[in-house]
Image (cartoon, rainbow, N blue to C red):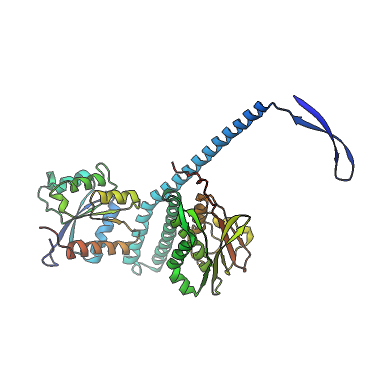
């Protein structure tokens, strides 16, 4: 049933007139039923999404696991070839062996990266109150040799405690600070680890004075195996930030980067304050 | 039993189904010039027959050490481990679980079944040589085993 009403409205250009407004008049129980139906559909969709996520996790885990074995054979036997036969065949052979070694090493790093990615969900621990200062300190200690080598200055503000998997937040900070050290542009790296309060939400950040990232690639950096630089320019297996994204998402937060080339980068993430409940895990 | 002299060869049983892995272990022993004689069986049934000196293994020497892969066809490594550690005679032989799995469950399970140690197979031949040398140095030279 339709109920026609009219209203006087002023439209752009100053003209006014009467416009018919069509309004669906639904009895209250019909509305209730429609909402219930939509809720059910939403639940089904959420369920499906969670299932798909789980399947993807399993796929990554199995792929990494199954590739590991044959790859180990290739790596080991190419190494044996190199150790025993390098310099004993001819210069072509030596070069071929080196390319094969390099390929095997890179693939190894990728497979290790895939394992690391799948472990975020498969080996994640339950959320407990975690002191972020401790997570940052552990990450900084582990990175100490790299920090000293780069002559870097790492400044850490006081951070709050959050409900989280502390080991994963340490890994998150390890990857973000490690990245800041690596993409340093030859300057003495300055890394600032801190938190801002934006509209009632903690926004954590790791800011550096490094080479920065073109905003065009701001999304791409979080995608698995995406590299923005030549392999010999900057090391890395293209998995660190993908792992960061997974960790933050497992905690129900968001991660993004704000940067301009040459002006450093600020990686920001949120970890929701969850007193009322935890995000649903995709793990069965 | 510690070896009286370095020149004596020690019997080791390798339970491993992959020829590629077996060869790598042999090459590592060769690289490090270790006085070990590697006896290789490819599944759990063979392993138990070897240890009980049954059938074609009636004349073999009991190994001083067992290197055990967990993923075997037929009777698996876990079953072999549990049978060895359930046998009053065989349980004295140190079992080194040498496997590709890095799952915490597998590690827990192996120690739960009284494995003597758990080592993940490395993807690097230098590391493998180091591990094999380390096993020989610790379990067969430094450690005193029962006669």
| Residue nearest the observer in this picture, A47 or B5 | A47
Residue B39 seen from this side: yes
Q: How many marks?
A: 0
Up the image or down, A135 lies above or below A62; here it is: below
Up the image or down, B26 lies above or below A20; here it is: below
For the C terminus of chain A, give its image quadrant. top left
Left or right of A123 on screen, residue A15: right
Residue B4 location, quadrant: bottom left
Left or right of A274 on screen, residue A109: left
Residue B64 at x, y percent in the picture: 15, 57
Left or right of A262 on screen, residue B37: left
| Residue nearest the observer in this picture, A269 or B136 | A269
Up the image or down, A12 lies above or below A99; here it is: above
Residue A112 at x, y percent in the picture: 42, 56
| Residue nearest the observer in this picture, A196 or A78 | A196
Tell me which residue sits at (35%, 53%) in the image.
B102
For the N terminus of chain A, give its image quadrant. top right
Residue B69 seen from this side: no
- The residue furthest top is A1
- The residue furthest front is A275
Residue A104 at x, y percent in the picture: 41, 59
Residue A4 location, quadrant: top right
| Residue nearest the observer in this picture, A99 or A222 | A222
Residue A24 at x, y percent in the picture: 73, 29
């Amino acid at each position: 049933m339709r109920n026609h009403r009219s209203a006087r409205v002023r439209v752009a250009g100053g003209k006014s007139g009467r416009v018919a407004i069509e309004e669906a008049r639904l009895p209250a129980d019909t509305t209730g039923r429609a909402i219930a139906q939509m809720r059910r559909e939403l639940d089904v969709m959420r369920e499906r999404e969670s299932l798909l996520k789980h399947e993807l996790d399993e796929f990554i885990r199995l792929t990494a696991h199954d590739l590991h074995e044959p790859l180990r054979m290739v790596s080991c036997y190419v190494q044996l070839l190199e150790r025993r036969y390098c310099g004993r065949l001819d210069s072509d052979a030596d070069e071929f062996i080196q390319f094969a070694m390099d390929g095997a090493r890179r693939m190894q790093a990728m497979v290790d990266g895939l394992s690391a990615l799948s472990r975020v969900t498969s080996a994640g621990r339950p959320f407990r109150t975690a002191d972020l200062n401790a997570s940052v300190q552990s990450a900084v200690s582990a990175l100490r040799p790299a920090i000293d080598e780069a002559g870097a200055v790492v400044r850490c503000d006081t951070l709050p405690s959050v409900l989280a998997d502390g080991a994963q937040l340490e890994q998150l900070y390890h990857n973000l600070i490690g990245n800041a050290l690596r993409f340093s542009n030859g300057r003495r790296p300055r890394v600032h680890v801190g938190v801002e309060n934006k509209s009632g939400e903690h926004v954590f950040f790791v800011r550096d004075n490094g080479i920065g990232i073109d905003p065009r690639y701001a999304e791409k950096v979080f995608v698995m195996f995406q590299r923005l630089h030549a392999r010999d320019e900057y090391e890395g297996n293209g998995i660190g930030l993908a792992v960061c994204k997974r960790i933050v998402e497992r905690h129900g937060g968001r991660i993004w980067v704000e940067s301009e080339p040459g002006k450093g980068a600020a990686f920001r993430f949120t970890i929701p304050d969850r007193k009322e409940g935890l995000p649903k895990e995709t793990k069965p | 039993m510690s070896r009286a002299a370095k020149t004596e060869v020690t019997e080791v049983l390798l339970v491993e189904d992959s020829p590629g892995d077996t060869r790598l272990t042999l090459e590592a022993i060769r690289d490090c010039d270790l006085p070990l004689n590697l006896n290789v069986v490819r599944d759990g049934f063979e392993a138990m027959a070897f240890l009980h000196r049954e059938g074609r293994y009636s004349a073999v020497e009991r190994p001083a050490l067992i290197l055990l892969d967990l993923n075997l066809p037929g009777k698996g490594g876990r079953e072999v481990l549990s049978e060895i550690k359930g046998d009053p005679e065989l349980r004295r032989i140190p079992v080194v679980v040498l496997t590709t799995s890095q799952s915490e469950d597998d590690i827990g399970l192996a120690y739960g079944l009284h494995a003597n140690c758990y080592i993940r197979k490395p993807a690097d031949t230098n590391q493998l040589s180091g591990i094999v040398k380390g096993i020989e140095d610790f379990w067969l030279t430094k450690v005193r085993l029962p006669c």
